[in-house]
């Protein structure tokens, strides 16, 4: 798609761009044909970044800017510039990336010895930098992209010697089936000769440009010079001169490689593997682990059922229905590979139009779930003749271009989207925009079946959910197929998934919905996949079975295990395990990335990104470290851009990393996490685990007790009981074998709190154990009270033998006895019931403090027995209830009187009609 028509709407020059509340501009770093790059300070990251925006905000420019970012947003390699965030603010689009403080390639490899001296070649620098350039280009090709503008100014070398490839503004897919921009692109002097013939670019095209850079580094001049037309013609007619013919002293191996890279025939140039081999680089050293199984590879083994389900869904759509297919699954299960394999054969068909997009976690753009879809639609419409597009354009397209300005790149849309008076209510503008998109797809469906594929929906936004719901709303929804894949573990935290579920539920049964869940491969399919990846070898059958079992059916782990096996060349004594792979890959990480992974793994739960960076002490290199960990599937981000949290990609990774850490390092990491959390005001309960892991038992004990008290205050009794038990264990660990009086007092207090929490949680037997233990060593009155409470809990819990034993001990101490049987209790019961009738229920009210402690203890003991035996032994229970009532009325303490009368009413109501009347009184 070529740059747009003259009438394309454009905004002012970006010289007016003053930064944002988040990004403070420092200076301009450079500019090109379409973009301007600034040095800016990112307040959120606390670091300097490079910020690229457009010279003019045209629809075409916005599309290209997004393409540049999205092509490599998930790509992380030390020799490719790291991209951070794509943002839109007040209509201005820009993205941020790693700021490279260095010099360009030629200045680095041909430095000046003195200020006025001529640049001279430094062979060691050249060799070191060129090897890194080769690694970066191979990694780019492995990711499926061509650079198409490799030249010295796009190659920066930091002071430490690290080379970084910059500027992906012309990046294009290696796959010829993907959309490409036609025409001459790039910088003429570095452009391959076949591009002048209009040939499709390929990997050999990039290597020609690399050859020109190498030639210039070796000789100090370009292989072809002159006016533009002469350069194009000479490249097509003549082979490039040998670099050694100009600079005889250059290293012969680099001279030979340079000549091979500059061959006119692209088929005669060395490919990725040949270049690496010529430089003595192994492929394992050049590229990170890919994000997922390749769509055209063996990763689809075992997914035949899911593929058939997608085919049936498309059949429904072609019969005139709107169909929504959800494809949930855990990370690494191959969701994207499945859908891509289903869609790729349809890319060249005329009866369907495949529009693919993706939600990017690091993008902050409106309608992010649809942004890529509309970009793809714009490209497809741009390939059509204007007369074919005009019938598709809805009347209210102006409102739609407010949401998606890239559509203005299409002439037929720009003509119909002239400025007009808009409704005052922005909700009406949005309603018209939604209706316009629905109309556009309805008209498009008259010509072919639209298929919309949106990957990583968990990163979508609520506005996108509203738009999707309106697009699919019955009746008369446009006949199309929408496929959305997402991580099943993000359902509860995703704004899009929550909002879309509500919207789809409101749509009712008229909406056709299908779900195709992607789970682990079955053992047979997992083994088949492993064997297909292993290739031809004698032990392929045995290894395939072993890998399948170790992977748990996870395709990502299967590939990781195979690649590790191929890299090490064979099995060790312990066989092949995921732990082996994780440890081996961990060792390849640089120190900041290792440190960040240790923090995330030791935390054991999602940890806020900024806290993780602080705990790891990697704020200066945090973005690159996180990028590499994400790209190599060590870590994933949850919670979106507003509150990102980090966790390990899989529990197996967390377990392998933590198991390999020495105790001292584990403790140090726990302490760093605890201190970072404490500085952010984290809840005590959150801090406990890490102070305990750090070996700071005193702080862990204090925080655990505080957390338990808070849980009890919030009536979270089970949680409080668990925390009090933890606090008790920590206290005992702290005091050791010896126990001072103060420590004993503290321990009894904890036991009593533990017992009360268990009582409130309805765990009477466990409560009694804690209360009895608390009674040991307590002063006599307190010991008697705690023992009574324990006995009552045992009786209530049905532990009669033990409960009666405890209560007899209590009664003995207060001068009372418990009859051995109901028969022996009967005379006392009758006498006390008669006394109650004669006495009545009158009492003189007294405060609890005015009643002797011994009298209160007797009341409480009798009440405990009456309550505990109430459902088991009515005679003895009734006897002690009568005692409770008489003693309570004589004491006059209101709470105990009320308690005794309540229990008396319960007993009276159970004795017949007369009793019911008495209970009512």
Image (cartoon, rainbow, N blue to C red):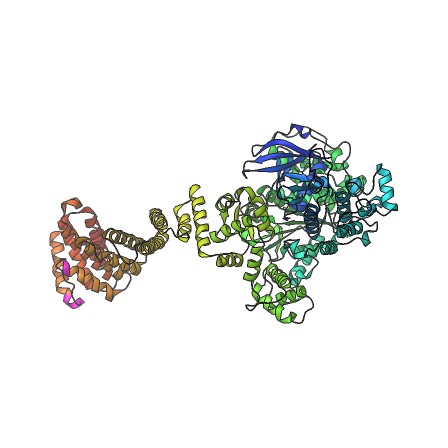
Residue in front for this viewpoint, 571 or 528? 571
Quarter of the image for the N terminus: give it. top right
Can residue 438 be seen in the rendering of this structure?
no
Can residue 514 be seen in the rendering of this structure?
yes
- Horizontal side, residue 140 vs residue 499: left or right: right
Residue in front for this viewpoint, 478 or 365? 365
- Horizontal side, residue 495 vs residue 477: left or right: left
Give the image location of residue 190, x and y in percent: 78, 42
Q: Quadrant of residue 413?
A: top right
Farthest-out residue, right: 237
Q: Number of labelled discs?
A: 0
Residue in front for this viewpoint, 625 or 852? 625
Give the image location of residue 13, x and y in percent: 69, 29
Give the image location of residue 163, x and y in percent: 66, 45
Which stretch is magenta?
812-824
Residue in front for this viewpoint, 605 or 314? 605
- Horizontal side, residue 268 vs residue 443: left or right: right
Vertical comparison of 666 with 418: above or below: below
Give the image location of residue 818, x and y in percent: 16, 63
Vertical comparison of 438 with 576: above or below: above
Whether the magenta-drawn stretch holds residue 141 is answered as: no
Magenta stretch, main secondary structure, is loop
Vertical comparison of 746 with 421: above or below: below
């Amino acid at each position: 798609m070529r740059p747009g028509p003259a009438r394309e709407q454009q905004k002012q020059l970006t010289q007016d761009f003053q930064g944002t509340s988040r990004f403070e501009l420092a200076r301009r770093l450079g500019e090109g044909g379409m973009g301007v790059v600034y040095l800016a300070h990112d307040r959120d990251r606390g670091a300097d970044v490079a910020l690229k925006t457009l010279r003019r905000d045209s629809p075409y420019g916005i599309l290209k800017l997004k393409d540049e970012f999205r092509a490599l947003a998930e790509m992380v390699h030390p020799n490719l510039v790291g991209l951070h965030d794509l943002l839109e603010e007040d209509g201005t689009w820009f993205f941020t990336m790693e700021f490279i403080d260095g010099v360009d390639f030629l200045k680095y490899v041909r430095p000046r010895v003195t200020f006025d001296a001529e640049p001279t070649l430094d062979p060691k620098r050249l060799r070191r930098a060129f090897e890194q350039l080769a690694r970066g280009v191979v990694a780019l090709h492995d990711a499926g992209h061509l650079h198409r503008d490799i030249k010295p100014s796009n190659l920066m070398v930091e002071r430490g010697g690290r080379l970084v490839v910059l500027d992906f503004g012309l990046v294009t897919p290696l796959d010829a089936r993907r959309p490409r921009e036609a025409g001459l692109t790039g910088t003429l002097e570095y452009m391959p000769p076949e591009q002048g013939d209009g040939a499709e670019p390929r990997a050999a095209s990039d290597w020609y440009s690399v050859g020109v850079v190498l030639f210039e580094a070796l000789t100090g001049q370009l292989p072809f010079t002159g006016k533009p037309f002469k350069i194009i013609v000479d490249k097509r007619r003549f082979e490039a001169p040998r670099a050694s013919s100009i600079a005889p002293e250059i290293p012969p191996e680099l001279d030979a490689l340079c000549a091979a890279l500059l061959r006119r025939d692209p088929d005669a140039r060395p490919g990725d593997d040949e270049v690496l081999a010529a430089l003595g680089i192994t492929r394992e050293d050049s590229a990170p682990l890919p994000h997922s199984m390749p769509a055209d590879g063996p990763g689809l083994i075992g997914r035949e059922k899911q593929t058939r389900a997608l085919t049936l869904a498309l059949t429904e759509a072609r019969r005139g229905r709107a169909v929504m297919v959800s494809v949930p699954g855990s990370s690494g299960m191959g969701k994207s590979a499945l859908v891509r394999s289903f869609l790729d054969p349809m890319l060249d068909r005329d009866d369907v139009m495949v529009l693919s997009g993706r939600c990017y976690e690091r993008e902050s753009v409106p309608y992010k779930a649809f942004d890529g879809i509309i970009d793809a639609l714009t490209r497809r419409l741009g390939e059509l003749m204007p007369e074919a597009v005009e019938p598709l354009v809805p009347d209210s397209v102006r409102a739609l271009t407010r949401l998606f300005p890239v559509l203005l790149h299409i002439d037929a849309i720009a003509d119909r989207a002239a400025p007009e008076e808009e409704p005052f209510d922005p909700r009406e503008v949005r309603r018209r925009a939604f209706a316009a998109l629905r109309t556009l797809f309805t008209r498009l469906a008259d010509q072919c079946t639209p298929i919309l594929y949106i990957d990583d929906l968990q990163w979508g936004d609520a506005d996108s959910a509203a738009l999707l719901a309106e697009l699919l709303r019955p009746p008369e929804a446009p006949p199309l197929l929408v496929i959305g894949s997402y991580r099943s573990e993000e359902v509860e935290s995703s704004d899009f998934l929550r909002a879309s579920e509500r919207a789809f539920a409101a749509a009712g049964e008229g909406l056709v919905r299908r779900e195709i869940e992607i789970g682990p491969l079955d053992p047979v399919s997992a083994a088949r996949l492993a064997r297909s990846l292993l290739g031809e070898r004698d032990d392929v059958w045995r290894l395939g079975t072993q890998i399948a079992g170790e992977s748990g059916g996870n395709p990502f782990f299967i590939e990781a295990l195979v690649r590790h096996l191929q890299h090490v060349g064979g099995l060790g004594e312990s066989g092949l395990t995921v732990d082996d792979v994780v440890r081996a890959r961990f060792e390849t990480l640089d120190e900041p990335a290792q440190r960040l992974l240790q923090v995330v793994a030791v935390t054991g739960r999602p940890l806020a990104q900024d806290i993780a960076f602080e705990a790891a002490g990697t704020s200066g290199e945090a973005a690159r470290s996180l990028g590499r960990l994400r790209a190599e599937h060590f870590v994933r981000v949850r919670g979106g851009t507003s509150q990102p949290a980090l966790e390990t990609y899989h529990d197996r990774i967390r377990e392998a990393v933590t198991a390999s850490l020495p105790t001292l390092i584990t403790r140090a990491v726990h302490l760093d996490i605890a201190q970072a959390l404490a500085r952010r005001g984290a809840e005590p309960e959150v801090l406990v685990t890490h102070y305990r892991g750090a070996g700071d038992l005193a702080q862990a004990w204090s925080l655990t007790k505080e957390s338990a008290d808070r849980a009890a205050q919030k009536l979270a009794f089970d949680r409080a009981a668990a925390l009090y038990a933890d606090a008790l264990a920590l206290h005992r660990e702290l005091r050791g074998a010896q126990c001072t009086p103060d420590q004993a007092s503290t321990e009894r207090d904890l036991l009593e709190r533990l017992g009360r929490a268990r009582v409130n949680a309805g765990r009477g037997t466990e409560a009694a154990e804690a209360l009895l233990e608390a009674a040991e060593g307590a002063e006599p009155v307190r010991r008697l009270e705690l023992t009574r409470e324990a006995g009552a809990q045992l009786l209530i819990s049905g532990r009669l033998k033990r409960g009666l034993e405890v209560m007899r001990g209590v009664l003995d101490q207060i001068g009372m006895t418990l009859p051995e049987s109901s028969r022996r209790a009967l005379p006392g019961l009758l006498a006390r019931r008669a006394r109650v009738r004669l006495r009545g229920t009158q009492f003189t009210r007294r405060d609890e403090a005015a009643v002797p402690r011994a009298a209160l203890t007797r009341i409480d003991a009798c009440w405990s027995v009456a309550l505990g035996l109430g459902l088991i032994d009515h005679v003895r229970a009734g006897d002690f209830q009568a005692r409770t009532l008489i003693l309570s009325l004589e004491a006059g303490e209101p709470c105990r009187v009320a308690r005794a009368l309540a229990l008396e009413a319960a007993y009276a109501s159970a004795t017949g009609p007369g009793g019911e009347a008495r209970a009512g009184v």
